[in-house]
Image: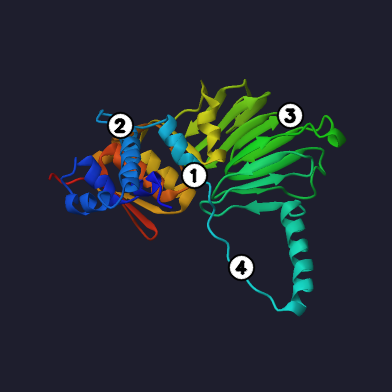
Amino acid sequence: MLKPEDLLVDDRFVAWSMSEGKLHQAYWEAWLVKSDEHQEIAHQAQLMLQELHFQDVTPEIATDAAWQKLQQQLTQEKPKRIYLLARHWQKAAAILLIGLAAWFMWPNSSDFRTDFAEQQQLTLPDGTTVNLRANSHLWWEDEWAAQGVREVHLEGEAYFDVSPANTQAGMPFVVKANTLGIKVMGTEFNVVNRSNRRQVTLVEGSVSIVDQGQPFQVLRPAQQYYWQANEPSQIREVTTAIFTDWRNDRWHFDQMPLSEIALRIEEHYGKDVIIANGELQQHSLSGTAPAKNLKMLINAISVSLGINAQIDGERIMFSAKQPQ
């Protein structure tokens, strides 16, 4: 069944709506007269577009009910492939699948990786839960907690909900992220360790931070340690949801330039993002957008900034619109 959200990813509908009917006029007028249902769906889609589109110097993606409604429509996963087995293989296959499921669900392995556009939730041997973001790697060396420390290593990004671990009471939990060391006892926090930045956002509890040989610093809830290449590190007050809501497939932007958004897309989806016009790199967005569906995310960015966007295989191109 056609929904308003389906029209939002149709470039012809967006162009027709934003041009006040000057583009693709004959096609959509013919489509509208086919039924009252078409007219109602188009009306709802255009209301959503009005929420998306701003004429400000720094356009914003809407954060209210329109985006929440879109988010509810993006919960369907890609269809899984189903393989039919001959009857006499079914029992053996079931045993194998149970064994594989147990291996994946219980961390007998000490090495976990996520692919582009993939998220994974892990439960560590001490009960700590970890949400591992796309394009990330979590591992630990030697036997778990053998040296009296629950220590893990991270490349990428992860959200930690650290358990006090009754059987390992008093044993500190340490995250190593490049030169960054984070020591906790029981708390919730988000860690980013990418090539150009390191970041720790504390949600609950307390953590101590040591980076690049500097004296350790203690974070309080709603504080963030932030380091970016060629800039001094800093501790700043933040709204934690902005940095942790990726677990719910929502991305938050706060006056973020298109060049930085492009980097986030490359990190998460593994696509090459090209900004054709250098001037576009500094166009910025503020607000919240659903990120479970790449096409919806790209379309929201392009509509809000009033620019063109094209997904071509492994490449995404942003370019300025040509004068009509």
Q: Residue at x 46, y 53 (%)?
A: 270
Nearer the observer: mark 1 or 2; the answer is 2
| Secondary structure of residue under mark 1 | loop
Looking at the rendering, which quadrant does residue 100 occupy? bottom right
**Mark 1 or 4: the one toward you:** 4
From the viewer's perspective, tell me whether residue 86 is left or right of residue 76. right
Q: Earlier in the sequence, mark 1 or mark 3?
A: 3
Q: Position of residue 52 (x, y in %)?
A: 33, 35
Q: Is residue 100 above or below residue 240?
A: below
Amino acid type of the residue that numbered disc 2 sits on in the rendered structure: Pro
Q: Nearer the observer, disc 1 or disc 3?
A: 3
Look at mark 2 in the image and give the residue it sits on: 59
SS of the residue under disc 4: loop
Badge 2 marks a residue whose secondary structure is loop
Q: Give the amino acid type for the residue marked by disc 1 in the picture.
A: Ser
**Circle 1 residue:** 195
Q: In the image shown, does 145 or 52 lie closer to the viewer?
A: 52
- Closer to the N terminus: mark 2 or mark 3? 2
On screen, residue 125 versus residue 312, left or right, reads right
